Amino acid sequence: MIQTKRRVVVIVGRPNVGKSAIFNRLAGARIAIVHEQSGVTRDRLMREVNWRHERFELIDTGGIYNIDLAAKQDVINTGVRKQVEVALQDAAVVIFVMNVESGITPMDEEIARLLRQKGCFTVIAANKADNTKRDDDALEFTKFGFPVFPVSALHDRGFDPLMKIVLDELPDIENTTVTNPLKVVVAGRPNAGKSLYLNKLLNSDRLIVSDSPGTTRDSIDIPFSIGKGPQARHYLFVDTAGMRQRTKIEDTVEYYSHLRSTNSIESADIVLLVMDAEVGPTEQDKKIAALINESHKGCILLFNKWDLVEGKVTQTEYEPAVFRAMPFMKHCPAVFLSAKSGYNIRRTIDLIDHVAAQINTSLPTGILNRTVINACEKVHSPSVGGKHLKIFYVTQVGNSPVRINFYVNNPKWVLPAYRDYLVRSLRETFGLDGAPLVLHFKARPQKKVN
């Protein structure tokens, strides 16, 4: 059975040709490390990219470099080559980055041979083509038989023609959010500014906003979409009643409002936890956060009323204090905003779309296993009664939350600290901002002996 390729674009190339700079340019942010020293990017970086309303996964591979050309026939370091080969397993399109300043090198020729062997659709990004003279220098790369596009990551030059052919080669995928919109629940304590935030977000007064706590008694569904065309994501926003401590619930109506808010969180894809920045995280905020965490929901922390705090403390001072108070929410993005003035409202839209991509991401199996192998080689599992955990292989088995099965010699030997270490390692490689990550450890089935 032929496996259908996903919308995955992989960037490959030898060191110091500008792979990370191109990754950043296509992703629209300085995510990867850009440094003059060769080989800085050792691990793959993944990010969903929305280019001209077309979404795809972009993967930046580690640099391919030669250890000892005189002593080895293989001019590519074995470990890094293996990483690139793993990435190519999932690639629908490969962007092969070369440098017009240095021209063709033996390593470029070796990489081209590898790409032809794998049969991947490949385009050459002839980087550092900062002017039309450099465009002519890129013509020598046509000898490899791949389409060549002069580009300059530094000057944002030449990417539209390159990306047109890349997007044309990506497979079509079904947009499930058209028929099943992602549910985004706005939750928090009474009077934190949930309804005012939604009004400002939607540029509408359809929700009742009042200075009196408890104005919103029931959940309200609001359709919303981000993006255009067939790749647009569709959402359903839900404004919930303020969640007070159970001991302070005064009547039956408020009790059922609290219950509906809890049910809304448990049925959500993403929860926006709105808190009062002037007050800071309260015990009730922590309880709501714990419910979100225990329910394995995507989450963004919104600190409203920042206009009342600004000047007294900086965001760089405030954010670490938040995560000291709620360390179990460190993986969640935090936004400081003012629903009254509109400050940072646009950023919340971008983050909702980003977290939606994270909770629904499909981690390539090869890269996932390579990440776990690297983590285990770096830090060995602690001994349990003289025995050590051994991980045979891992595979993703679900989304929203991201669920990963680890097949091991004995699940009882997985200590909580080592589980947490594996979670951190996965987040360092794949990001998964705001996305819950659930690890299941299972004993590998024993082979039957005849």
Image (cartoon, grey):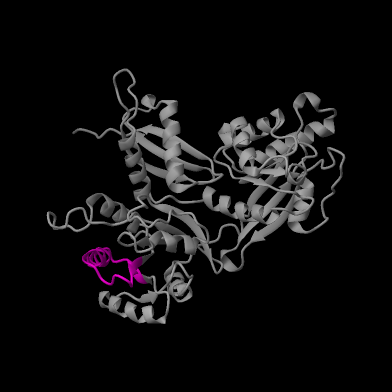
In this picture, residue 354 sits left or right of residue 244: left
Rendered-image quadrant of the C terminus: top left
Whether 156 is drawn above or below 192: the answer is below
Residue 166 visible (yes or no): yes
Q: Is 369 part of what is drawn in magenta? A: no
Q: Between residues 123 and 170, which one lies in front from this camera angle?
A: 123
Reply above or below: 372 against 255. below
Q: Which residue is rendered at x = 64% and y = 42% of the image? A: 267
What's the magenta region? 96-125
Residue 100 colored in magenta in the image: yes
With respect to residue 12, does 348 lie above or below?
above
Please provide percent x and percent y for residue 193.
Answer: 78, 44
The answer to whether one can see residue 56 in this image is no
Residue 153 screen position, x and y as percent: 44, 67
Residue 32 rendering spot, x and y as whole percentages: 45, 54
Residue in front for this viewpoint, 182 or 107:
107
In the image: residue 238, left or right of residue 165:
right
Count up the numbered dots: 0
Quadrant of the snapshot with the N terminus = bottom left
What residue is drawn where x is 63% and y is 35%?
322
Tell me what residue is drawn at x 44 percent, y 59 percent. 58
Residue 294 at x, y percent in the picture:
58, 33
